[in-house]
Amino acid sequence: MDWDDLRFFLAVARSGTLAGAASALSSSSATVGRRIQSLERALGATCFVRLPTGYELTEAGRALLADAGRTEETVRGLIGRHGGTNANPLGEVRLAAPPEFAEYLLIPLLPALLDSHPGLRLELITGVELTNVNRMDVDLAFRSVRPEGGSHVRVRRLADFPFSLYGSRGFAERHCPTGTSLEQLPLISRSPALERLPAQQWVRRNLSEAETVLRVTTLREAVAACRLGIGAVVLPDFIAEREPDLIRLGYSPAFHVPKWLVMHSGAADAARVRVVIDWLAEAFPFRSGSRGRS
């Protein structure tokens, strides 16, 4: 058996289609199909049922899935631990982060990191909901809610970021005369699927009587709506302070949200990953304060 065929098997098992596996592996559907056939011939078993809607695991495929996942973790751990020396880290680090966090904070800091370590390569993944540290989809991931963790996962509190209630200047002039309660303000809130986020929990505890006039999915949408004066919205200060027309409403900051750095124990001690962890620890302590406008 060609052990590399297991990579193709796992990609098909996770995506359910040849096209999805090909995209994940930067390959072609035809190549993925050939590798699956090669694996099945070597095993003498059918791993997938081919359906019009995609590929579904057979009983033999489900049995193989658990072993293949453990093999993948072992191989990635070996590669990670031998990816260069501490003095000259080599290889790629896969880092998952929320889109706005990546855009406003991470990317502006990357040139210094990459200039200092020319052998290092980064893959920045902003579809965080699609990544799984325990399965080693990524080496490092940022989370706003502390994960439960697992036997192969380490969690580190990286920094605390201030959040405040913001509105546009025009909105404040119309809706915030002296003595106005924050609960009387029309709100922009996140979608119900994001209720676990600390900002949404703060709104539920402190502005439970306020009327939500608009729900959005992303922070970018929230900023755009707030800028137009549609309502007040809770935003991280590191985003709002880039918007000259937004001002704080009420006390500030309203609360702080810790940012958790999650890593797989099999990769955390690799030189290439260790460099990025140390860089993040040095880059973000200053964010424990707040310096926006009010």
Image (cartoon, rainbow, N blue to C red):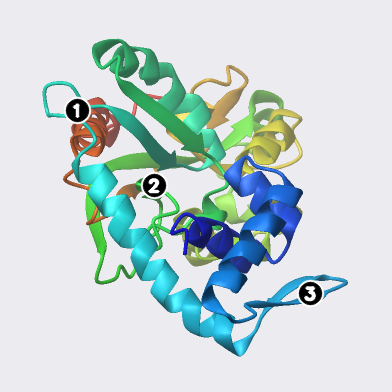
The mark tally for this picture is 3
Mark 1, residue position: 282
Q: In the drawing, what numbered circle is on residue 50?
A: 3
| Apparent side of residue 106 relative to residue 172 in the rendered image (left or right) | left
* Disc on the earlier residue, 2 or 3: 3
| Mark 2 neighbour class, 10 Å CA radius: few under 14, some 14 to 19, many 20 or more | many
Task: Give how far across and how far down residue 216 sits, in percent.
Answer: 71, 50
> Which of these two is toward me, 36 or 291?
36
Label 3 sits on what residue type? Arg
Is residue 124 something that shows in the picture? yes
Q: Amino acid at mark 1?
A: Glu
**Residue at numbered disc 2:** 142
Name the secondary structure under disc 1. helix
Look at 40% across and 46% down and name the residue there.
254
Q: Nearer the viewer, mark 3 or mark 1?
A: 3
Q: Amino acid at mark 2?
A: Phe
